[in-house]
Each structure stands twice: as structure tokens, then as C-alpha cells.
Image: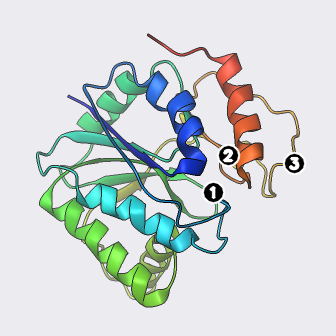
Amino acid sequence: MLRLATYYTPSHREMCERFVLSRAAGFTEVFVREYGQSCPTGSFKQPGWNACMQDKLDLLLRLPLDATPTLYVDADVVLLPGLAKWAEDQARQMDMHQIAYSDDVVQWCAGVMLFRSTHKTRDWWRLISEVSNIWDLPDQDVIHQLRIQCEQRNGSLPCPMSVLPSDRVCNWATLGNRTVWQGEDFTVPDSCVAWHANWTVGIDAKMQMLSRVGNLQPACH
């Protein structure tokens, strides 16, 4: 059993359908919802972005509490052959309440996450949602700040947490780049099973990047 979870707004519908939903072979369940366009531009940290990230947390809070291994992906991720099998194997090695984030190099990335849907992971999503509203920060920044505060004060997070291998879940930064992608050529590692159009701003740029990756690796059916 392996669940795929994702959401999209009207600005990202085509992206999600083309690069996520049409490539979901191997997943036993797809949990997907469409939300309203709270961020008019659909672009990173533009007005309405935090509300859009709250929609992600709403999706996660709606997952059934069945302990099913779940791979959450943002709409700007292209699923590549072998992803479902790899995620299943990875989940078997994880603690029941563990959450594994993708690697954004400078911090954990909430764009691709592997976990089981349990009461403890749901409590974590609820905490992130509440603190996001209090601090007026998006989910990923809240997770990063809580992690840093926890480390500095020798505390402990409520769930075990880890980072997914960056040679499996890849993005522009994991290739060694620390600036926003401007259309440069790049090579997708042969080991990559999911590519996130991170460090890439704007719907047009993301579609261009995801198309390049998708053309290199056709979907499994």
C-alpha cells in the first residue's frame, strides 16, 4: 500500500495533471484536492502564498488516519519511473511516526515528504498550521525555525524526522546551484525518481523545467 497526496490551484492544474497525476503508476491510492486561487500569481512568496501553503496543510490534515505510507508532492514535481517502488522500500525503513523531507540544501523541503498518516503526524501538521498563522510564515519556514530552535535548546521534535536522499529526490539546488534557475542546461541524475522544480520561480519557468525533465524520462503506465 502506498498513497500519493497532492493538491493544486487553478494556476497549477495543468502542471499537476501533466507531471504528477498522469505519472502516478504504482500508487494504490491518489488523494488529491483542488483549492481556490489564494495567491493570484501562483508564485513563490507573492501575496497570498502563505494562504496557499495553508491549503497544503489542510490537505494533510484531511488524510485518513490509517498509517498508510504516504508520499506528498507539490504540483511542481515530476514523478519519474521507479518512484513508487523506491518510496515503498524507503517507508519500510522508517519509524511509524517518522517524517522524511526532501533536501532543499539550505533547509528541509516540504515539497516532497514521505510519512505514514498517524495521529502523531497529523498533530504535527496541525501544529505547523497554527504556528504558520501566528508567525505569518509559510509551512517550510516554520518547520525550519522549529528545528533550529529545538537544536539550540537541546529539545526534541514530536516526531522523528529525516531527509530523503538528494540523489533520489532532486532539484536545481541539489545539483550544486544556490541561485534561482534562469534556463541553464542541467543533467538529471540517473538515480532520480522525483524532480522538484524548486529554486525556480514562476509558473512558466516551472513548466519549462518540468517539461525538460519529463521529456528525458517518459511516464510509466
Where disc 3 sits, the SS reads loop
Q: Is residue 165 above or below residue 211?
A: below
Where is residue 95 shown, x and y percent of the image? 21, 49
| Residue drawn at x 68%, y 61% as measured from the top left | 41
At a point 42% along the width and 56% down the height, the residue shown is 35
| Secondary structure found at label 2 | loop
Total numbered badges shown on the rendered structure: 3
Give the residue type that dot 3 points to.
Answer: Gln
One can see residue 150 in this view = no
Between the residue at mark 2 and the residue at mark 3, the CA separation in whole angstroms equals 16 Å
Q: Which residue is mark 3?
A: 182
How far is mark 2 from mark 1, CA to CA? 7 Å
Circles 3 and 1, Cβ within 8 Å, touching? The answer is no
Callout 2, which amino acid? Thr
Please name the residue that numbered disc 2 is placed on.
Answer: 174
User: What is the C-alpha distance between the residues marked 3 and 1?
Assistant: 19 Å
- Which of the image's four quarters has the N terminus? top left
On residue 105, the disc is 1
From the viewer's perspective, is the residue at label 3 or at label 1 nearer? 3
Question: Which dot marks residue 74?
Answer: none
31 w.r.t. 159: above or below: above
Q: Secondary structure at mark 1?
A: loop
- What colour scheme governs how the chains and residues are painted in the rendered image of this protein? rainbow
Check whether the beta carbons of the residues at disc 2 and disc 1 lie within 8 A of each other: yes
* Residue count near mark 2 (Cα–Cα under 10 Å), binned few <14, some 14–19, many ≥20: some
**Residues tagged 2 and 3 counted as in contact (Cβ below 8 A):** no
Q: Quadrant of the C terminus?
A: top left
Query: Disc 3 or 1, which lies upstream in sequence?
Result: 1
Q: Please indicate whether residue 180 sits to the left or right of residue 174 in the image.
A: right
